[in-house]
Image (cartoon, rainbow, N blue to C red):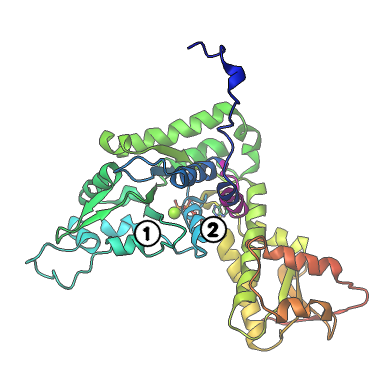
């Protein structure tokens, strides 16, 4: 039939439209993951396929390979997806391939065959119950992460080939495990150092890479560099079973700035959700943020050092301050940078200064999903309302 002959009888549909649930999933991932839009879109695409029921029978919902430099968000994306889908960032099945470098260690995953020494003691990790443990009435889906797969032994490869191709695994005692409701994600930083070198030119920091980064040409060569190093390492059978290879890009300074805000928001969230009595709100001034960024930036390690820097310069001092009751319930703490001493200082609005924030803190209701990952916005709101000329701060000494 001529495609144009009867168009008047047909209304055109929009195959690019995503369901509301998928859009929400994607938006929440964007709140948590910075600078890796392609990876987020792929994952949400698989979620859409799962939702529509159009998965291929007898295959996992999708097999994704995440490549790219260390500390660029490969593992974090799976954690964030678990958090969005199941409300807990640990709600996925994780196989640390580094723990299975010798073939005998595979028994920890599949159990030993009956009659073998240790048969009864070894509880396999990859049982059907383990896969289904996070299912709810609404969601029969499991995220399975094989982290750092380049470290896997041959025995683990063989096992994975079956899972990726037929969505089944046979345990030592012959029970079968069905992976057809799983999204399988494998991560590896193979090719990561070459990509970082390409991006950084001489390897001196992020700034020199800024212009290069955005060209399509660089984008294509990043992709090829990563895929070529994967092909050198993994067998063709293995590569053939992967639906999509996604290459994570090295993070740029503006990405790290956003990640800093997300991480500070998570610290705020931890404080508000903690069991401790002394719930409080803190806010970092711009110079304090810049100090954290400077301390926590190392082009070689992506966003990893940032997390450690926040723990060291924000979380530990705040813990000391609450333990010594210098911070008490309902306080508003401002974190600033003292240039002379080259360190952060902690200031508290004096008695009664932020009475208006008390209901927010004392109620201690968990933040809504919208605020999740944006806890700092709460602190900023409070900071916007604070009036330093009326409410002087008390300075703290951190041991
Ligand atoms: N793109 C990103 N968006 C938000 N946070 C990120 C991102 N990349 C890294 N992070 C932060 O850095 C931490 C480390 O990142 P992650 O564990 O995802 O690294 P990775 O890419 O898996 O590296 P590796 O190859 O070394 O395992 C995360 O827990 C998160 O806090
Ligand atoms: Mg990782």
Q: Who is closer to the viewer here, 338 or 252? A: 252
The picture quadrant where one finds residue 317 is bottom right
Residue 40 at x, y percent in the picture: 53, 45
The span picked out in magenta is 25-37
Q: In this view, does 128 lie above or below 197?
A: below
Ligand 2 occupies quarter: bottom left
Q: Is residue 126 magenta?
A: no
Q: How crowded is mark 2: few (under 14 residues within 10 Å), some or many (20 or more)?
A: many
The picture quadrant where one finds residue 10 is top right
In the image, taking residue 110 as reference, residue 98 lies left or right, namely: right
Q: In this view, does 76 lie above or below 246?
A: below
In the image, taking residue 224 as reference, residue 238 lies left or right, namely: left
Tell me what residue is drawn at x 62 percent, y 18 percent: 8
What numbered label is drawn on residue 84?
Answer: 2
Q: Is disc 1 placed on a helix, strand or loop? A: strand
Q: Does the magenta stretch include residue 36?
A: yes
Would residue 313 be visible to someone looking at this image? no
**Number of marks present in the image shown:** 2
Residue denoted by label 1: 94
């Amino acid at each position: 039939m001529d495609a144009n002959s009867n168009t008047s009888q047909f209304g055109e549909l929009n195959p690019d439209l995503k369901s509301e649930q998928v859009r929400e999933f994607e938006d929440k991932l964007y709140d948590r993951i910075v600078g890796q839009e392609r990876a987020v879109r792929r994952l949400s695409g698989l979620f859409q396929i799962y939702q529509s029921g159009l998965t291929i029978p007898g295959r996992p919902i999708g097999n994704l390979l995440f490549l790219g430099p260390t500390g660029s968000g490969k593992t974090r994306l799976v954690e964030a997806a678990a958090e969005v889908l199941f409300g807990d960032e640990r709600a996925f099945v994780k196989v640390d391939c580094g723990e299975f470098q010798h073939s005998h260690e595979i028994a920890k995953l599949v159990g030993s065959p009956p009659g073998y020494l240790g048969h009864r003691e070894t509880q396999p990790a990859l049982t059907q119950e383990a896969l289904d443990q996070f299912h709810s009435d609404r969601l029969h889906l499991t995220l399975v992460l094989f982290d750092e797969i380049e470290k896997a032994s041959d025995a683990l490869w063989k096992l994975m080939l079956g899972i990726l191709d037929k969505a089944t695994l046979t345990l030592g005692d012959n029970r079968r495990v069905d992976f057809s409701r799983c999204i399988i994600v494998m991560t590896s930083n193979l090719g990561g150092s070459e990509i970082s070198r390409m991006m950084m030119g001489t390897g001196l920091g992020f700034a020199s890479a800024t212009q290069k980064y955005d060209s399509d040409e660089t984008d294509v060569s990043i992709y090829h560099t990563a895929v070529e190093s994967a092909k050198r390492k993994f067998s063709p059978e293995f590569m053939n079973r992967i639906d999509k290879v996604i290459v994570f890009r090295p993070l740029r300074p503006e990405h790290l700035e956003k990640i800093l805000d997300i991480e500070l928001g998570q610290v705020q969230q931890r404080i508000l959700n903690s069991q401790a009595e002394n719930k409080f709100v803190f806010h970092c001034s711009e110079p304090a943020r810049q100090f954290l960024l400077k301390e926590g930036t190392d082009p070689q390690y992506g966003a990893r050092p940032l997390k450690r820097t926040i723990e060291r310069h924000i979380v530990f001092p705040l813990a000391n301050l609450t333990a010594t009751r210098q911070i008490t319930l309902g306080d508003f703490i401002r974190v600033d940078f003292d240039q002379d001493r080259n360190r952060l200082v902690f200031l508290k609005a004096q008695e009664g200064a932020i009475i208006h924030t008390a209901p927010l803190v004392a109620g201690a209701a968990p933040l809504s999903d919208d605020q999740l990952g944006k806890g700092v916005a709460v602190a900023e709101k409070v900071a916007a309302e604070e009036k330093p000329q009326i409410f002087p701060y008390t300075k703290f000494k951190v041991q």
